[in-house]
Image (cartoon, rainbow, N blue to C red):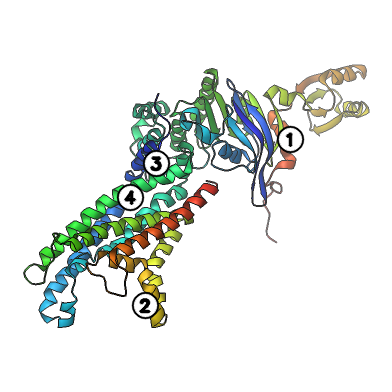
Amino acid sequence: MLKIEHLSKRYGDVVAVDDLDFDVTPGVVTGFLGPNGSGKSTTMRVILGLDRPTKGRATIDGRVYSDLRHPLREVGALLEAKAVHPGRSARNHLLAMAASNNIASSRVDEVLEFTGIASVATKKVGTYSLGMNQRLGIAAALLGDPQILLFDEPINGLDPEGIKWIREFFRTLAKEGRTVFVSSHLMSEMALSADRIIVIGRGRFIAQGSVDELTADAVGTVTVRSSDQARLAEIVHARHGSVRDRDDRALTIEGLTSDEVGEAAFAAGITLYELTPQRASLEEVFMGLTSDAVQYASAGTEVPRGK
Amino acid sequence: MASDVTLASASRAEWIKFRSVRSTVLGFVVTAVLTLGISALITSVIRGHWTTMDPLSKLTFDPVSTSLGGTLFAQFAVGVIGALFITSEYSSGSIRTTLAAVPQRLRVIAAKAIVLTVSMLIVAEVLSFVTFLMGQAIFAGVVPTASLATTAVLRSVILAGVYLTLLALLGFALGLILRQSAACITVFTSLLLVVPIIVFLLPQSWQNAFSKYEPSALGRAMMSTAPPSQMFGAGSATVILIIYVAVAGVVGSLLFLRRDA
């Protein structure tokens, strides 16, 4: 069990992590979701003892990282930033890691085979593509066959096939009873690969739960096509709903359930051609939750023109 | 069940890392080429001009330190080897892998220091003996030569290797403090080249007081069979250089313990 206990980390005046407190339980894939710069990587680095927390701590089965007897056999990590000397071969990189934690060198070949980079293992890491680097990072994380695995933005640089593979790989690891903690700034990815999601923004805890739980409380919408769109819109307003979007064909209604819209239309004698309840996507929930907490917001999508 | 992450296992890992990058191999090749090449050049030139040299120069001629002259050029190469051993970990980000594998930071420093000292000492001692013997062979017949059978001569040759090893460790300690290759190499070169120039610009009495403390002056004293009176003796010079390395090492270690990786 990985526990983040009232963890805060500041770099000078910048508060990177602000009183985070949550558990990451074994047996499920836990997603760690937040915009860029929200403190995900900092949290990962504190777990690994690379950065010293300003307050609080992160523990692995009750112990801080530096107290682990063989850290690589208990916690495996794929860090977002490169953590390999470009002039060294993948094999030598892994052999050095194995030697430090008394792991048999045969295990190095095993993880190289498993991640599919055995054929390029003697090449310099500097010549690797982004995807190959990710595979090497995964090989390094698995080297000590640890019960706890951390993946910081693992799908960066993977091709669609690699992404599909890694999702199944996370599931397999979790099914084996391991703790799998995966960070991402992509909510769509988390919706697909994580069983449980912890959402943070600007270093602060925002929400946690399954995808269903996170989206359940969010306001859904109802899409309607009818014989009299204008009158239907009026009725919706009268019943304290709102029309969020309208085009020639359909209304998107907020604040009323599909049942309520259907009954209101029936009472007014309007024929419905379509009545579709739309659940809020995790993406919408995420945007709603973190809109105040985005560190680098862009000013719209229109390209500024010179004057 | 195997034992914990010990100093021995950390050192094994550091040895794999040390030998598996080109900069180390290249550093040793440059060290060898500079030591042997420049010593060969110096000794050959002296042999060629020996008959026309003035009597005073002949009287103060030291065949030992002259034949080891190349090490004073190789000192820059070994400093770079030592510095890169740690600064390359920062520039590549591999320091994160290193510390995730061995979270006890002092153990990481100790392991690196052991690997650097042992490998550097072996290479530098072999080089200084080969250089010495090569120099005497070039001198033979024309210029007076020295023999390893003389205690002071043997001491000078051994200390030449020790000097290079200590400078590699100094480069490593500076690397711990500065973390950047370029900054580190600049400071290292300044200590060896620029500080003597500054001291040279000082009044004569200050020069006499300070110049013997310069690392390169300590090196010359270590390699000399009979150091001149304004310099330290070989033993004292060795101890002072060790103190420099130790102080830089302690400062570097304290910073390494405190900083985020």
Do pointers 1 and 4 mark residues of a single chain? no
Q: Are marks 3 and 1 on the same chain?
A: yes
The crowding category of the residue bearing disc 2, from other C-alpha atoms within 10 Å (few below 14, some 14 to 19, many at least 20), is some
Residue A161 relative to residue A27: left or right: left
Q: Kindly indicate whether the residues beneath marks 1 and 2 are on one polypeptide chain.
A: no
Image height check: is B185 above or below A10? below
Residue that appears at 13% across and 65% down: B146
Circle nearer the N terminus (3, 1): 3
On whether disc 4 and disc 3 are found on a single subunit, the reply is: no
Tell me the subunit letter for badge 4.
B
Q: Nearer the viewer, residue B201 or B211?
A: B211
Residue type, mark 2 in image: Asn
Front-most of residues B165 and A150:
B165
Q: Which residue is mark 1?
A: A289
Distance CA(mark 4)–CA(mark 3): 27 Å
Q: Which element type, helix, strand or loop, lies under badge 4? A: helix
